[in-house]
Image (tube, grey):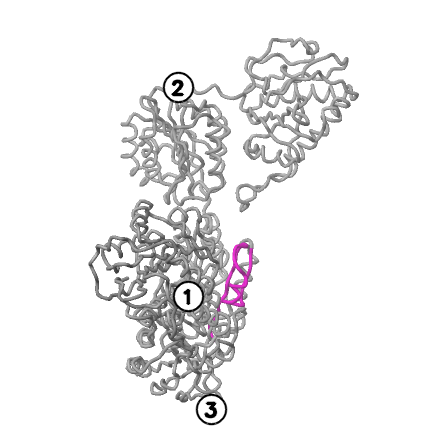
Amino acid sequence: MLIRPKPILTYSSGVLAIAFLIAGLCQTFLNRNRDNEVTTFYFTVHTRMLSYEEVEADYGTAAARLQAEFSKALGGRATTSGNGRRKRETKTDGPKVTVIGISDNDSDGISVLSGVAYPRPTAPSKYEFTQRISIIPNTVVVQIFSAGHGDPAVPTETFCFPTVTGTPSTTRTPDELTSCPSCPVPECPPQTSCPPCSSSPLPTASSGLPCKVDIGLILSATREAGQANFNKEVEFVHHDLASKWSINPEATEVNFIAYGSAGFYPSDHGYEYPNNTAFYEDIDKLYDRRLLARESIQIAIKDAAMDKEKRREGVKHVVVLFVYHTSQEDVDSAVGGANDVIADGSSLIFIGVGPLVDLEMLNALHGFIIGTDVLDDITAEKINTAICATASPPTFQYPSDWSRPTLATTTLATNFGHLPCQADIVIAMEKSHVLRYEEFDEEVLFVRDKVVPHWTISINETQVLPFGYGRKDFSWYRNDFTYPNNGEVFTDLTKIKEEELFSNPDFGMAISVAANMLTKVRPNSVFVTLAFTYTSALPDAWLAYAQLPFLKEPGRKFVIVAIGNNYNETVLREFSSNLIKATEYTDALADQISEELCKDVSPPPPSSTLSTPSTTPTTSVTTESSTSEQPQGPMCTSNGVPYKVDISLYVGASLEAEWNSFQEQLEFIHHRLASNWSINPLTTEVEIAAYGEYLKTGFSPSAYKYARNEDFYNDIDSLSTSKLLDGESLSTALTYASFGNANRRQNVNYSIVVFFHFISEYEVKLSESFIKTAQSKNYKVVLVGVGPLPDLEMLNVLNVFIVRADILDDTVAEQINKAICDIGPPPPFYYPTNSPRPSVPTTTVATTFGHLSCQADLIIAIDQSFAVGYNEYYEEVLFIRDKLVPQWTIGPNETEVVLFGYGKMKRTSFKTNFNYPNNADVFADLTKMKIKNLFDDADFTMSVTTASSIIKTEASPRPDSVIVTIAFTYTSVVSDASSVDEAINELTEPGRKFVIVAIGNNYNETVLRKYSNNLIKVAEYTDDLADQISDEICKNVSPSPTSATSSLSSTPAESD
């Protein structure tokens, strides 16, 4: 935004301010810029610290206050960068800022142009500089330039300063600094007050490179670069390198990737940026992205060649590649790719950053080679020169007096400490993508250089087994306790440090690997698991809980070192009370760990036999008390000794159970039965399934692998959406249960609990063989009869535990739990004398029936879709059976019916001809219809097309009968309007009538009235509704004079 200049201020500070401004600006700044070891920043800010009126009133005081605020901000600590994981710190006593000029900011506040000089080694990047100034409230940096190494000084004559006499002058802003004006400026004081005019303007927005070029930037997001250097690459490209380009389709276009051996981050708009701003927005997204493993020039060049299809035809192409490390093997493997890039007409520019790059080695790749220790303006100028160079790249040679820097190395310690016990220590180090590479390096180096030197490693003293772990993976270089000395541990930890990270975290993997090392423990050694973790992630919690007890038996200890703050302390304390929390790796932490290892633990007696994990743990494991907030309900005991139990629950999901009962069973298990269990691999494990006559559905995906009750409750809630199954068969449930589940724990008591609603002698006979199979394996069977239908005494021949559940309540839950844990044979079941066998309520067919005023063949379409729901479907069918049909006398000389249920693609029917002999047969078929499953989707189309088909091809309407179709619907969904229109024409021919009964409020009345004016709308099924439908049937309709032509009849059948 252009800021209009204002007349210069007069101010009262007089000589002091003049001396400060002119001497400070003209002398100090010019001198500093002549110093090749100084970097000078000129920057403009918009701020509301002061109003322009305050500046006009006293310029000197205002300038001094602004200088103090800027200097304070630049001298303090920088803000947290990125996601807050790192903090850069600078010296607290920073350089002093000089205010050069102040102008009014039309939007609000003032604009201030200032300058500051840094000794070159301590100069921040422009990004850091901007961040520090931005700490000041209500202040934003809008422009920044830097100069150094002899760069021309700022053309200060384009700014005017207060003079002793108060001669009017002008304050100019950076937006106006596009050229150097003639001197003296008319509004300025005499020439003696201004420095001579410079021949070069202040650096501004670039006019662009002198060549038209496509530039491919390959940034190194690698461990060799490190996070700080990668961030500096991003800042350098934005503020120093690309700021000299004019990015647009007519000049320079850019593509970039940040790469590593584990992948790359691409640009969003490669070679399609409309301007510099769009590119800056894209490149800035890379800042603080996590590193991508190792650097590889070979991979980088291969990635660079991937963008060939995006480049502009006939335009020079240059690849700029940042390198932080070279090896002869990597360079040799990259030669072929480099030759291909050059043969394709592209140029390569290698930016070797830091001491680990052998620049002469890069000559083999035939590119321009630029070496630097600091990514700065000078480096940017060299790169831009190389980009537009027309000559071949020169061979790089180090100066004759150059010596390769000596790299810092860490050597093995010579003095080691001693533990007070002989210990075999498993060291599990977090190695997942939750960590950044520098954090993993810190972790491993801490173990290598601070922890292990506390111990003397030998076959007679301390032994270790270090490994890195992640989700479903781990890495080690030895799988037993056989290290001869500290040196070999140092070597293996160094190898682990160089490895790539695994993908996801899994604290359970640390436990699993440690548990599998128990067979390698030396006699007379304590076994210690030392697990470092940044998280409490447990994707396979059941396995972790199952193996945990083996790490905590006598003579064994489990110590957790939790780093940072991204873990759940409650979860970790469930695994071990020996929890050490830390935010950084220190000598004090190493001391604390070593002191903890042998505390309160001693080798087990030689005669003791401790358990080791097998494929599945045994029940003989003892555990420490847990701080878990899980339910601590009754655990099965034998002679006072607790024992584990696996429970298999089978819930009746049949149409005999009906929908309400199915839901009640699930709620009962959740809130009354399982709420008394402590579900985890150390105590009770469980599976749940819903069953019918032939099928089992909703089998719990985490059967016998639940870490806590809440996980099981989630599966119950998911099961509640299952469809009901056609019938109920106790033998079906027992078939599945008797075979057991492959996930079930071995050597653990097993109880089968089956809920059922119906029993017959035939089912009892079928179940006998399965019960015998289960009992031969010492499985316990508990049968829970729900509601009034089961004859429970019939089950005594099976010799199982029987629970009567007229109501599923706490008493029933207590009886089931007692049966699960009971020792000894099950008692027989008998109904109490004061509580006789309940009578089963039945509905029988009526004995008297009404009469219609006409002879009618009725087609009744029943909505059988999930749009209805089971309860509404029952009401619908029972209304037709018990209220509507009894208003008619069914028979060949009066009223006949055809019944069918419909969904979108299916129907259910029992007869497709008008040949019911009496009301009783209709009653029986509607009773069967009631216990049919619902179809998935609703579609009114099926009701009318099926009715039309019945009239035309399936049934034989009687002569002298009116044909009336009555369609019950809860929706107005029509999938095929043309088919509906055609069918409606068939249903409304002379002597025929179409009646719609719309239930509820989920239909579109306009749609339904399009198909029939005989629309009956209701909210519930009542006697009045039955009367209304019957009155409507014969109204305004009489038999067609032409008899029905269809003669096709079908045998009674059921089709789905």
Which residue in the protein does label 2 denote?
211
837, 209: nearer the viewer: 837
Q: Quadrant of the C terminus?
A: bottom left
Is residue 581 located in the magenta-colored stretch of the structure? yes
Numbered circle sitting on residue 354: none
Outermost residue, left side:
1048
Viewer can see residue 996: yes
- Residue ID for mark 3: 833
Lower position in the chain sequence, tag 3 or tag 1? 3
What residue is pinned by disc 1? 879
Can residue 480 be found in the magenta stretch?
no
Query: Which amino acid type is marked by label 1?
Result: Phe
Q: Nearer the viewer, residue 544 or 601?
A: 544
Asked if residue 913 is positioned above or below residue 206 in the image, the reply reads below
Looking at the picture, how far across and down is residue 941, in whole percent? 33, 51
Q: Nearer the viewer, mark 3 or mark 1?
A: 1
Looking at the rendering, the stretch of residues picked out in magenta corresponds to: 554-582
First in sequence: mark 2 vs mark 3 = 2
Q: CA distance from mark 1 to mark 2?
A: 86 Å
Up-down relation of residue 259 to residue 626 (above or below): above
- Residue 647, located in which quarter of the rendered image? bottom left
Q: Quadrant of the N terminus?
A: top right
